[in-house]
Image (tube, helix red, strand yellow):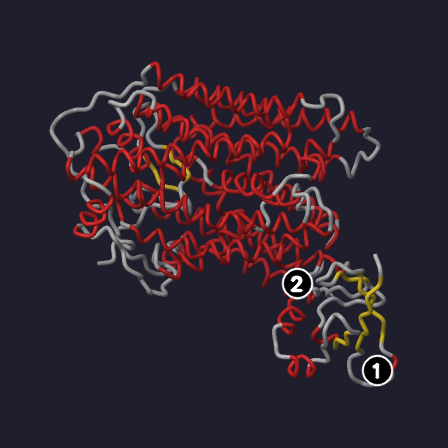
Amino acid sequence: MSVGVSTSAPLLPASDTNTVTSTFSLVDYVVFVLLLVLSLAIGLYHAFRGWGRHTVGQLLMADRKMSCLPVALSLLATFQSAVAILGVPSEIYRFGTQYWFLGCCYFLGLLIPAHVFIPVFYRLHLTSAYEYLELRFNKAVRVCGTMTFIFQMVIYMGVVLYAPSLALNAVTGFDLWLSVLTLGVVCTVYTALGGLKAVIWTDVFQTLVMFLGQLVVIIVGSVKVGGLGHVWKVASQHGRISGIVLDPDPFVRHTFWTLAFGGVFMMLSLYGVNQAQVQRYLSSRTEKAAVLSCYAVFPCQQLVLCMSCLIGLVMFVYYQEYPMSTQQAQAAPDQFVLYFVMDLLKDLPGLPGLFVACLFSGSLSTISSAFNSLATVTMEDLIRPWFPQFSEVQAIMLSRILAFGYGLLCLGMAYISSQMGPVLQAALSIFGMVGGPLLGLFCLGMFFPCANPSGAIVGLLAGLIMAFWIGIGSIVTNMASGMAPSPANISSFSLPSNLTSVTMTTLMPSTTLSKPTGLQRLYSLSYLWYSAHNSTTVIVVGLIVSLLTGGMRGRTLNPRTIYPVLPKLIALLPLSCQKRFHCISYSQDLSVDTATFPEKMSNGMLKNSRDKEVMAVPEESSAHQGNSPTFILQETSL
């Protein structure tokens, strides 16, 4: 039975007894505080190591000397937020293991960045991903991309700090604003002082804590219910082990195609063009190390997904044998995991504190990455181009002030989040809405040499308008129909406070109770297709506007900003087929027809696969023919 596409949550078993809010023991507090102290210590170590000799490159890019493994773990930690730790097991508990098929998208979602985006960005020696937009288009496109990213991350920062603290307060009684303030201050201090190197190494530590906390829950929970074999048996009996749903309907929330292929675009928006991730690639000591770090994320992501699914299954079986209390049964889905952990580990002092440390490690890693990436793009894209006279010392000081400023802004956004109530749902959905258009903007520039600045700006605006139209239209439609709002990337839960409702960012939205028709059907598009839909809008509109405005005629195109799609595809063909396209090996002179060579070069330079420069020289024999001229590509020394 396919439970991955259920249209309503299953009824939760409940007992008649009430549950008193669990509290931390002294040992739990010690474990939790230890996480904060060690995170701060790692950050301060890198801050004060060589104090006075730091450069802007060290602060923003870790001096481009990071090795593969820490970069990979930092990439993983940035993606694995606290709300995902709470949300994924809840999804598995309620709807079964259909969500596990998201792991199928990780392969292409990481392979494409490794072989397309990373080589282009790394060889251009960028600091900000949005520098690429100026090299490919112009400064106006760069500023538009930067401002869009800043808007996206500022909206998200306060929520990702506030929401886990709120859930923790509701379940354990842990002081809400003390946890918000503590996390915000600790994160701001080590990010501002230590820079990217401190962020990466604290991410490594926090990733290990996340793994350990989740592993403890799986081991203790499976032992308590009779082992993982019994967990799988009971889950199968109750229909929680999902099969492959091959329904191609993009309006069904979770199917194999939605998860495995729609998820690819979501992964590309996160791992391909997001500044927080691109900055880590560019901090690697070599391009090969950057590619290997992207490869290393793949097994780690699969492991994290499997662990989250196991927690959800263990939680389901546990509550079949130990029924929920009335308070737990009435709780929101995103609180299930915390209730489960407090029930499961209440007799084991220190372990609840370990899981809370795991939860807040996710918050710390995500927020610190946001601070650092925001400080970087503000410095490199909005300040340095207009004030190039800044000295190194002034630039370092300003970079630290920016990181501190974004930290304070994060705390302010957390407070605003607490006052927004239902409006917070729209604020959270913005994060998912913006990722797709930014992906489309980069793809437009990288794969379509005819795209020009006018097409890029209009395409980005069209993508953002389409994203907001569908996202906010979904919220309004659901609210008008009297249902809980369910935007693209969030689910809602009630609060034990004066707020009527608030939302936590998770990977799963709520489901609708009836099949919509007409325009409402567009609003029910699965959230995993949002990035694909919005990025395609940017590309299509951008190409149309570019062609209508003359393409790149009269403009200079930097060939290194283009990914040579056709030559790469032709290189995969047999040699006999390559010759039909006038293509031969790079080890010889290479004749390429301009119809199959997307870079419109005239005596331009291009890097080939062996990192040698290639000079494009017009072939004399084709100069006076009616056909498109061909070029001879000749290797030259660097």
- In the picture, measured across the screen, residue 11 lies left or right of residue 96, that is left
The number of discs equals 2
Residue 423 visible to an observer of this rendering: no
Q: Residue drawn at (85%, 71%), measured in percent from left and top?
A: 617
Q: Residue drawn at (40%, 33%), measured in percent from left and top?
A: 212
Image position of 436 with respect to 553: above or below? above
Task: Classify 10 Å Cα crowding around label 1: few (below 14), some (14-19), many (20 and above).
Answer: few
Distance between the Cα atoms at labels 2 and 1? 32 Å
Camera-nearest residue between 555 and 160: 160
Camera-nearest residue between 503 and 518: 503
- Outermost residue toward the top in this view: 26
Toward which corner of the image does residue 510 lie, by quadrant?
A: top left
Question: Residue 634's x, y, as percent?
Answer: 82, 69
Task: Classify 10 Å Cα crowding around label 2: few (below 14), some (14-19), many (20 and above).
Answer: many
Residue 425 visible to an observer of this rendering: yes
Toward which corner of the image does residue 326 lie, by quadrant?
A: top left
- In the picture, measured across the screen, residue 76 lies left or right of residue 26, that is right
Image position of 168 with respect to 594: above or below? above
Tell me the residue that label 2 is attached to.
545
Which quadrant holds the C terminus?
bottom right
Image position of 130 with respect to 192: above or below? below
Camera-nearest residue between 499 and 22: 22
Question: Residue 435's x, y, as percent?
Answer: 53, 48
Give the amino acid type for the residue marked by disc 1 in the picture: Ser
Which quadrant holds the N terminus?
bottom left
Question: Residue 29's x, y, as percent?
Answer: 38, 17
Name the front one of labels 2 and 1. Answer: 1
- Outermost residue toward the left in this view: 16
Tell me the residue that label 1 is attached to.
622
Question: Residue 300's x, y, as percent?
Answer: 46, 45
Q: Residue drawn at (54%, 60%), measured in percent from left and top?
A: 536
Name the secondary structure under disc 2.
helix
